[in-house]
Amino acid sequence: MNKYYLLFLILVLGASFATAQVHLGVSGYAQKLSLNGDSPEDQIVVAELGYGAGLSLGYFILPEIQLTLGATYDVRNNQVSKILPITDSLVPIGNFRLTSYAVPVGVRIFGGSKTWYFSSGVTLRFHGNASVNAIDSDSSYSVSSAFVKVEGSLYLGFGYMFKIGNMRVVPELRYEQGLSNILNGEPLATLPPSPTLRSTGFSFRLFAEYAFGGGQ
């Protein structure tokens, strides 16, 4: 019985690798990720347009299921505004910028047409420089020491893949929710003790991938 099961397993794995297809390409995206949690007193942090670009890799383990891996340079921008009393109007007082190296790991699950898909996965960000630019004085200062080195988040999205020869062009809309506090607890003058901030928002991504091998 065991030998027949082993033979069956070998045949299944052989068929899987024969029909497997690897996608290798580049990606670029625009994103709006806000910082939710503790905000400075009488201030609000609003997401502004950020961006990212890098490499993408996909591997079909089944005709409808593709594992994905990315490596991107990631920039998040946020505006800090003061809330005026009585009117509750906002006056921008500074701009916050955080750079990271992001590694999204996930899966695409395709429908019967092999074009529309649902995506899900996790993103690890390795933080680089964090800085604040004060609008009134036009001066910039680093706050990198107040941020953790690694941040984790969960993403959900959907996209569409269409073919141009051996190229696959893939637009995708993605929602992302931070799972961890991006602050390390270092005191900041404008924040309460032990503040918590998590990143959340949307991105629109475009992949251009070259298909190697058989399969889809």
Image (spheres, rainbow, N blue to C red):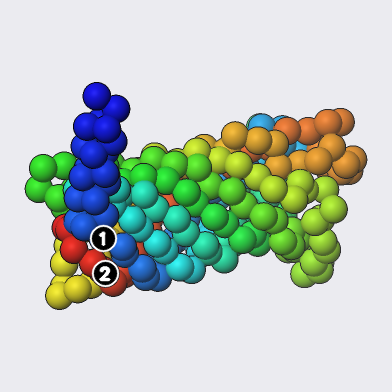
Q: Residue at x 37, y 70 (%)?
A: 25
Residue 197 placement, left or right of 12: right
Q: Earlier in the sequence, mark 2 or mark 1?
A: 1
Q: Is residue 73 above or below residue 118?
A: below
How far apart are the alpha carbons under marks 2 and 1? 6 Å
Residue nearer the viewer, 50 or 129: 129
Residue at x 64% of width, y 59% of height: 100
Sort mark 2 into few (<14), some (14-19) or many (20+) by Cα contacts within 10 Å: some
Where is residue 94? Give x, y as percent.
Answer: 71, 57
Instruction: Specify the quadrant that holds the N terminus.
Output: top left
- Residue depicted at x 53% and y 64%: 72
Element type where label 1 sits in the image: strand
Type of amino acid under label 1: Gln
Name the residue that disc number 2 marks. Answer: 212
- Can you see residue 39? yes
162 in relation to 113, above or below: below
Q: Is residue 183 left or right of residue 193?
A: left
Q: Is residue 180 left or right of residue 187?
A: left
Identify the image quadrant of the C terminus. Answer: bottom left
Residue 21: which numbered mark, if any? Answer: 1
Q: Circles 2 and 1: CB distance less than 8 Å? A: yes
In the displayed structure image, the side of residue 83 where residue 183 appears, left or right: right
Kindly give the residue lying farthest to the top in the view shown: 1
Q: Residue at x 88, y 41 (%)?
A: 186
Quarter where residue 77 is shown: bottom right
Q: Going by the picture, which residue comes out furthest to the bottom?
A: 165
Q: Amino acid at mark 2?
A: Phe
Q: Position of residue 195 (x, y in %)?
A: 78, 33
Pick the front one: 117 or 129: 117
Per the image, label 2 sits on a secondary structure element best described as strand
